[in-house]
Each structure stands twice: as C-alpha cells, then as structure tokens.
C-alpha cells in the first residue's frame, strides 16, 4: 500500500504560485514578469482536454501517481470550460530526498484564470472541478513529447498525492 499525502487546494495567487512560475498580469503593469521561453523556438498554442475518467479516485479525492516536466519551455494553462485544479512541484527538486515530497502543492484555477509554469516545473493536470471534462487553452513547446520528464511517484517512490477539492 503506497503512502498517501493529502493536498488541499490553495487559491491561485502570485506569491503562492511563485515557486512554480508566474501569473500573467494586465498589460503595462510594472510587475509584469510572466515571460515565456522556448529554447527550441517551437512555441505552439492549442487546446488540450482532461476528463475525470482519466483519474483514479481515493477516499477523499483524486490520486496523483506521477508528475511531468518540460525542461525546454514554459507552459501556460487556462481552464476554459470549468474551474480546475493542478498539482505542481518546483523545478529544482528531483524526489531523491524525502523532503522533496513536502514541496508539492495543489492549486485551484478558476475558469479563465491563466498560470504559467516555469521551465522544469513538475505538474499534473489541470483536471476539472464540478464537471466531467475540461477544455484547456495551452501554450507550450511543440516538441513537448520529446521533452517530457516523468517522476513515477507510486511505482518508484511508493507515494501518491490525494487531491482534496472539498467541492
């Protein structure tokens, strides 16, 4: 039986999100620092979809058994059809130390709220809240499939995160 770490959803604020990336600000805002990077010059915009049938249910929420990362580009996500949640961990950790597991967070993303992941930020989702499916506006590198690092939390570390939405 894997160790289960529960994550409560945090509100999406610039300061809480700072270890994982940036939040786009209004045009000409002095603190506008939400730049995007594509080391392979392959920026791409599309829509992606996630559905609740992709998820494994725990006692109180969905179970996160892996995280992905992209080292060659940032990624900007905006839930279009419903609120959502996303699980993230800072780019600097590699899950080789037990303390790394305490740096994972879950955030609530309101419908039409965008968040940019820094290069290398570990992530899972976004997944819908209060809906069976989610359409997501996505800005990322076209070559993401060849730059998709994975940490297998359950398989390699006998640990899963249970995301509690309280919805």
Image: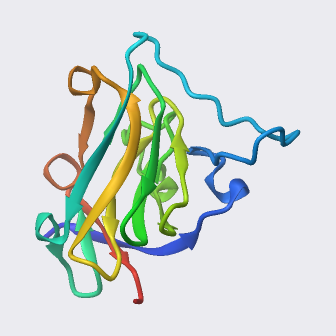
- Please provide percent x and percent y for residue 37: 53, 22
Model colouring: rainbow
Residue at image point 55% right, 60% down: 113
In which quadrant will I find the C terminus?
bottom left
Residue at image point 25% right, 37% down: 150
Decide: is 121 above or below 144. below
Q: Kindly give the residue lying farthest to the top in the view shown.
A: 40
Which is nearer the eye, 72 or 80? 80
- Please provide percent x and percent y for residue 152: 20, 46
Can residue 66 be seen in the rendering of this structure? no
Which is nearer the eye, 47 or 36? 47
In which quadrant will I find the N terminus?
bottom left
Decide: is 52 above or below 139. below
Residue at image point 23% right, 51% down: 157
Which is nearer the eye, 133 or 18? 133
Decide: is 73 above or below 84. above
- Please provide percent x and percent y for residue 42: 38, 15
Residue at image point 56% right, 71% down: 10
Whether residue 161 sits left or right of residue 20 in the image: it is left
Whether residue 164 sits left or right of residue 102 in the image: it is left
Q: Find residue 95 and report its image quarter.
A: top left
Q: Find residue 51 and report its image quarter.
A: bottom left
Count of all numbered marks drawn on residues in the image: 0
- Please provide percent x and percent y for residue 32: 77, 38
Q: Find residue 54 and report its image quarter.
A: bottom left
Can residue 97 be seen in the rendering of this structure? yes
């Amino acid at each position: 039986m894997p160790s289960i770490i529960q994550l409560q959803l945090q509100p999406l604020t610039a300061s809480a999100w700072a270890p994982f990336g940036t939040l786009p600000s209004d045009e000409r805002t002095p603190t506008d620092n939400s730049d995007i990077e594509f080391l392979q010059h392959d920026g791409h915009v599309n829509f992606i979809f996630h559905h609740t049938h992709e998820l494994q249910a725990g006692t109180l929420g969905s179970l996160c058994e892996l995280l992905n990362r992209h080292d060659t580009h940032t990624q900007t996500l905006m839930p279009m059809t419903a609120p959502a949640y996303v699980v993230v961990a800072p780019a600097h950790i590699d899950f080789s130390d037990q303390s790394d597991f305490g740096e994972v967070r879950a955030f609530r993303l309101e419908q039409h709220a965008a968040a940019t992941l820094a290069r290398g930020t570990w992530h899972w989702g976004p997944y819908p809240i209060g809906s069976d499916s989610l359409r997501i506006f996505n800005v990322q590198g076209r070559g993401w499939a060849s730059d998709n690092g994975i940490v297998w939390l359950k398989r390699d570390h006998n640990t899963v995160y249970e995301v509690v939405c309280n919805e």
